[in-house]
Amino acid sequence: MAGQQNPPARATLHVVSVETGVEVAFDDGAWSNPYVVLDYAAEGIYLITTFGAYFGLWLMDPATGAITRVANLSNVQGSAGSNVFWVGAINPSDPHPIAGVAPDQLDRLSLADGSRFTWFYRPGSAVHFVGEDLGGHPIVYVLNADGSTEVLLVPAPGINRPILPSWDVLDTISGAISDSHGIWFGSPKGIYFYSDAIGLLERVSTQPGYPANGCL
């Protein structure tokens, strides 16, 4: 019986043109720590890494495969477009951060002007970016110190509201995509939808799947 093959030493990133079907493959770093696609922008493809010396935010030229680090920071969680990013951080004033390492706040970082400020902070909790509404306001997942969980829409610093009334899908929803109707989430349990008019997340289809584009 043939022995188990070792995984390849390097990962590969494939860039495919939807219009032409042309596919180009580029080196994507060590197999143990490849780049992860964060966003597609006019200036290139933003990438992040999660371990070791490669912490940071990177920009890849899809024509050449050249990768350049544009910010030396960790825990970049999402992109808001126009060189704005959402970054997790631990507030030094939190006396009891979860495990001492989990981000308890979400910062808004602009590479255009270098500004960075706290958008959401909750002491003793774990905070993670999930997606955005059409206005660019972040949706965050919060694990509180007492073990309770929340999904919040944060339209401005210091202002937030819960949008998920049923916790049984909390660990399965992802892939938030916004359009003129509201925000769509995918899940193995179906498709979920949120709008300001409804005020809460509701299941609109029992078909498992994840949205790939909005319905503009």
Image (tube, helix red, strand yellow):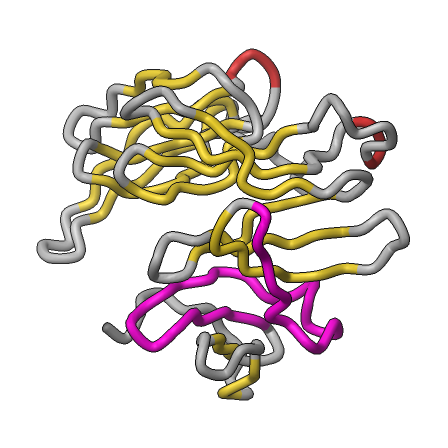
In this rendering, the answer to whether 143 lies above or below 203 is above
Q: Camera-side residue: 62 or 42?
A: 42
Residue lying at the far right of the rendered structure: 146
2 vs 155, left or right, is right
Q: 89 or 3: nearer the eye? A: 89
Magenta stretch: includes residue 201: no
The quarter of the picture where the N terminus appears is top right
Left or right: where does residue 143 sit relative to residue 88?
A: right
Residue 132 in the image: above or below residue 81: below
Residue 101 location in percent, x, y?
76, 28
- Residue 128 x, y percent position in the rendering: 62, 45
Picture coordinates of residue 122, whole percent (x, y): 72, 43
Q: Residue at x 52, y 39 (%)?
A: 77
Residue sitting farthest toward the left: 20
**Residue at x-position 57% and y-position 54%:** 159
Q: How many marks?
A: 0
Q: Residue at x 57, y 77 (%)?
A: 201
Q: Which residue appears farthest toward the top when viewing the image?
A: 53
Residue 176 inside the magenta-drawn segment? yes
Residue drawn 63% across the image and 66% down it: 162
Q: Which residues are magenta?
A: 158-187
Asked if residue 105 is positioned above or below residue 31 in the image, the reply reads below
Relative to 25, residue 207 above or below = below
